[in-house]
Image (cartoon, helix red, strand yellow):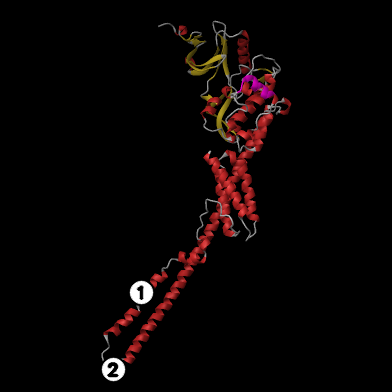
Amino acid sequence: MPPAESVVIAPDVPAVIDGYVVERELGRGGMATVYEVSLPELNARAALKVPHAGLEESWLEQFRCEAELLFNLSNQHIVKPRAYGRLADGRPYLVMELHRGTTLRSLLDARAVPMPVTEALRYAIQLARGLRAAHAAGIVHRDLKPENIFVDTEEKTTVSAQEVSTLRLADFGLASRVGRKFTHAGSADYLAPEQAAQQPPDGRADLYSLGVVLYEMISGRTPWAREIGLLELLKLQATTDAPRLESVAPGVPAEVAEVVHKLLARNPAQRYQTADAVRDVLETRLKQLENRVERTQVNFDLNAAQRRHATTDLTIAKVQVAVGSRRRWAGLALVLVLVAVGVVLGLGWRATVSQPADLPIKPELVKTPAAVVEPEVAAPAVVEARPEELESLRRPAVATVKPSTKPPTAGCQVDERWRKHALADLDELTQRASKRDALISWATDENEAISQAIASLASGADCGSVDQRLKKFDARVNQQERN
């Protein structure tokens, strides 16, 4: 068997590089290939990046520049380098930390529907943190896109008090120092207009790319159709504002859409000027959405408590009616028994008086009292009559306390029963809507407006307007649930 150093996994890559054993290919790009390697002496694993053979010298210089920039960066959201060197043929290589997970591109492609807004904001906040570190060191990434964003599924990061997968900026192959003009451009879909115009970019170009990534996470597509040609795409980016996010992601909160479109401003001066500013505004918007969800849940819990209280009061009232009913029936039964006894005694006295003394009493007269006394046996059945039947005759509308799952019927009049049913329906609809990120903002506002309308209607007034709003609420929630 030949020595391990002579074994190769590709014609241009040796099996062992500076003690690292090349084990398998992890990914291949236009400029380099990444391998998983091991360091047996230390029982450690890492990622090895090697540029393709035959590249122009400018690309090899850019690879060396990438290594230099990474060694001058230190941030949780940026991949960490471990070693740098050159192969026997003079090509540079870069050893980096190995993380388990996937790229954001693979994650988005595997989803059947776009990412929830709150999840997208948590990812974008991490990207802004990484860009802040790069920009503070005077480095522009210049090729920010889902393919170059690594999602570490093993390491968690806290964003707004919630743990999520850690995102890391990877592939600084096109990165450069601020103000340096470089001929190689990034991916057209995520390219800032000033980059397409061959102008030296600064950190605001990365913020534009972040806006495109956030747009795609929320809507499932980039602002411009990928079917159009490259020149037409670059022309659109330079001359036309991006299509509104709301047009491709109905229900997205307006304040979130405004952040995205400020990031996508064609003029760099109209964008957020720093990654710090982007991080701050994204954290604010995320907190606002979380507060809305919490407020909606609190309102639901309060109304649920009110319904339980009303149900308890109704139950007590029904028990009181039932007890009162039993007492009245018992009193009536006693009166009937006394009347029956009186009738029996009266009949017996009449029979005794009218019968001659020398004649025997007829047998049928002896049976008569027994027949008359039969109500005494039937009396308990009267006492055990079902009180709910009496209750339904007295208060038919109160007998059912379970809130309906459909909006009240149009044409009704306002009373306390209607208010309870309307609030119960509103709570049920709001609870369903709160499970849909696209409806949270709208449903919270609608809940407040309808609650105020219910409270403001005077008793006896027509409640058709509120019924219509509840029906529209129900229709919109049903539509989102079908989607």
Main SS category, magenta section: helix
**Residue that appears at 43% across and 66% down:** 386
Q: Is residue 143 visible?
A: no
CB under 8 Å between discs 1 and 2: no
Left/right placement of residue 373 relative to residue 459 reads left
Q: Label 1 is placed on what type of residue?
A: Val
In-front residue for pair 429/476: 476
Q: Is residue 415 visible?
A: yes
Q: Could you tell me residue 363's position as x and y percent?
A: 27, 84
> Element at badge 2?
loop
Determine which quarter of the picture holds residue 137.
Answer: top right
Circle 1 residues within 10 Å: few <14, some 14–19, many ≥20: few
Q: Could you tell me residue 273's position as x and y percent?
A: 71, 27
Boundaries of the magenta span? 228-238
Magenta includes 27?
Answer: no
**Residue that appears at 59% across and 38% down:** 438
In-front residue for pair 69/120: 120
In-front residue for pair 84/58: 58
**Residue that appears at 62% across and 50% down:** 450
Quarter of the picture containing the N terminus is top left
Circle 2 residues within 10 Å: few <14, some 14–19, many ≥20: few
Label 1 to label 2: alpha-carbon separation = 33 Å
**Residue that appears at 35% across and 86% down:** 347
Residue under label 2, please give it: 357
Residue under label 1, please give it: 377
The mark nearer the N terminus, 1 or 2, is 2
Residue 300 bears which disc, if any?
A: none
Q: Could you tell me residue 294's position as x and y percent?
A: 59, 43
